[in-house]
Image (tube, rainbow, N blue to C red):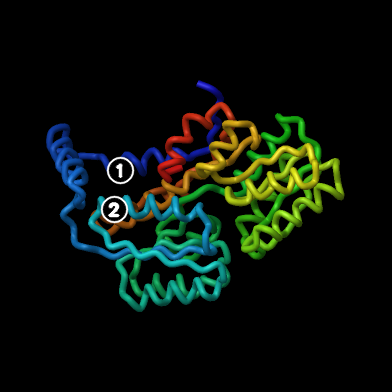
C-alpha cells in the first residue's frame, strides 16, 4: 500500500480496544454479540443509566469539520445510551457561557474545546468543582490537565505543523503561505509555528476573516498575485482549501494548495490532483472517543492516556490514499 505516514499515539489503539474488552473469551464475546445486536436494532448497546453529555466547541457556523466530530460523538452516544447535547460559539466568552449552562443543567459529563483557553478556564473549573467529569477535545492539549480534565483527545498541533513542514521539504517547496482563519485560536498559531520549525524555506502567516469566504479568497489571491515566489499555500481547515484553489486561479499562481483536515471535497481534490496533500486529525474519532471515554469513566472509573493526550493524528494524506478515503469522507466519517 502506498505511503501513509502517521504520528497517531499508541493510546488510540488502547482506546478503541477498551470498548471491546470482555471479562473472558466466552463471556466477553456474548456481551459484545449482545451489544452488536442491540446496535443493529437501533438501540443502545449497554444497559447503563441514561446519562447526559454536553459537547461545547469553538466552531463557527457552517464549519463542516464539526459536523464530522458531531457524527462520531452521536454514534458513541447512541451506543452508550447517552443523551448528547451539542452547542458551539466561536467567541470565547460565549463558549464559556455555554459551558456554564451545561453545568447548570447538571449534565453527567462535558466535552469542551480549548481553542481560547483563557476565556473558558473559569467555566471549566466550575464544572470540575461541581464533580462533572470533563474531557477536552481537538484543541488545548497543553492546558487540559492543568484545567482538571480527565484527558485530551486530538492531535498535537505543533507536531502536526512540523509534519507539514517536513512534507513541504519533501516536495521541494521554498516559500509557504500559512492561512489563519480564526484570530486568537492558539491551535492555529501552533500549527503555523510547527510548519516554520521544520520547513527549510520561508513561512509567512496570513490572517483572514474566516466567516467571509469571499474575503478569504480576495486576501489569498492578492497575496499570491503580489508575490509570485510563493509556491505553497497551507490552509488550516478543509472548507478553506477550495477557496484557496479559487484564489490561486484568480492570481494565475503556480503555488500548490495543501490543507489541514479532510472532508469529501478535499478527498476528491486530492484524487484529481487539485490539492497536494491534507493533514487528517480524524475528527470522527475525536468525537467518538471523547463521549465513549466519558461513558467508560462513569461506568467503570476508567481513564486513558496515563496523563498524556490520546492522539488521533496527524496523518499526511496524499493522492495515493484519496480514493480509499473518499468513500468514508462521502458518508461523513473522515
Pointer 1: residues within 10 angstroms few (<14), some, or many (20+)?
some
Q: Nearest the camera: 164 or 65? A: 65
Q: Which mark is residue 296?
A: 2
Q: Nearest the camera: 327 or 287? A: 327
Q: Is residue 57 above or below residue 205?
A: below
Q: Is residue 224 above or below residue 17?
A: below
Q: Residue furthest front?
A: 250
Q: Position of residue 75 (x, y in %)?
A: 32, 50
Q: Position of residue 88 (x, y in %)?
A: 47, 66
Secondary structure type for disc 1: helix
Name the residue at 60% across, 56% down.
187
Horizontal side, residue 183 vs residue 317: left or right: right
Residue at mark 2 to residue at mark 1: CA–CA distance: 9 Å
Which is nearer the N-term, disc 2 or disc 1? 1
Q: Position of residue 194 (x, y in %)?
A: 67, 47
State the count of labels: 2
Name the residue at 78% across, 50% down.
204
Q: Residue furthest bottom?
A: 104
Q: Nearest the camera: 184 or 181? A: 181
The quadrant in which residue 52 appears is bottom left
Q: Position of residue 22 (x, y in %)?
A: 20, 39
Instruction: Please say if the residues under marks 2 and 1 sit with CB atoms less than 8 Å apart.
Output: yes
Horizontal side, residue 251 vs residue 46: left or right: right
Q: Is residue 206 above or below residue 32?
A: below
Pointer 2: residues within 10 angstroms few (<14), some, or many (20+)?
some
Secondary structure type for disc 2: helix
Q: Which mark is residue 333?
A: none
Name the residue at 43% across, 45% down.
332
Q: Is residue 293 above or below residue 53?
A: above
Q: Which mark is residue 18?
A: 1
Amino acid at each position: 500500500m502506498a505511503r501513509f505516514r502517521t504520528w497517531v499515539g499508541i493510546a488510540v489503539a488502547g482506546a478503541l480496544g477498551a470498548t471491546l474488552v470482555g471479562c473472558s473469551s466466552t463471556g466477553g464475546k456474548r456481551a459484545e454479540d449482545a451489544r452488536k445486536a442491540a446496535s443493529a436494532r437501533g438501540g443502545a448497546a449497554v444497559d447503563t443509566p441514561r446519562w447526559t453529555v454536553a459537547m461545547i466547541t469553538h466552531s463557527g457556523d457552517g464549519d463542516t469539520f464539526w459536523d464530522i466530530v458531531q457524527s462520531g460523538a452521536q454514534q458513541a452516544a447512541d451506543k452508550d445510551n447517552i443523551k448528547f447535547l451539542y452547542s458551539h460559539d466561536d467567541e470565547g466568552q460565549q463558549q464559556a457561557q455555554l459551558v456554564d449552562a451545561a453545568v447548570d443543567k447538571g449534565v453527567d459529563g462535558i466535552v469542551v474545546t480549548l481553542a481560547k483557553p483563557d476565556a473558558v478556564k473559569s467555566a471549566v473549573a466550575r464544572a470540575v468543582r461541581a464533580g462533572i467529569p470533563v474531557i477536552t477535545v481537538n484543541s488545548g492539549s497543553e492546558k487540559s490537565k492543568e484545567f482538571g480534565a480527565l484527558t485530551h483527545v486530538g492531535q498535537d498541533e505543533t507536531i502536526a505543523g512540523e509534519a507539514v513542514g517536513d512534507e513541504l521539504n519533501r516536495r521541494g517547496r521554498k516559500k509557504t503561505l500559512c492561512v489563519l482563519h480564526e484570530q486568537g485560536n492558539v491551535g492555529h498559531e501552533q500549527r503555523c509555528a510547527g510548519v516554520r520549525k521544520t520547513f527549510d524555506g520561508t513561512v509567512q502567516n496570513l490572517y483572514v476573516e474566516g466567516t467571509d469566504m469571499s474575503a478569504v479568497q480576495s486576501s489569498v489571491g492578492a497575496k499570491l498575485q503580489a508575490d509570485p515566489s510563493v509556491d505553497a499555500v497551507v490552509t488550516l481547515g478543509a472548507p478553506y482549501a477550495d477557496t484557496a484553489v479559487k484564489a490561486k486561479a484568480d492570481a494565475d499562481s503556480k503555488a500548490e494548495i495543501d490543507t489541514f483536515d479532510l472532508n469529501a471535497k478535499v478527498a476528491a481534490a486530492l484524487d484529481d490532483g487539485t490539492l497536494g496533500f491534507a493533514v487528517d486529525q480524524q475528527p470522527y474519532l475525536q468525537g467518538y472517543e471523547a463521549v465513549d471515554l466519558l461513558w467508560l469513566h462513569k461506568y467503570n472509573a476508567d481513564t486513558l492516556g496515563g496523563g498524556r493526550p490520546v492522539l488521533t493524528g496527524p496523518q499526511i494524506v496524499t493522492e495515493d490514499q484519496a480514493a480509499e478515503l473518499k468513500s468514508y469522507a462521502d458518508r461523513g466519517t473522515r
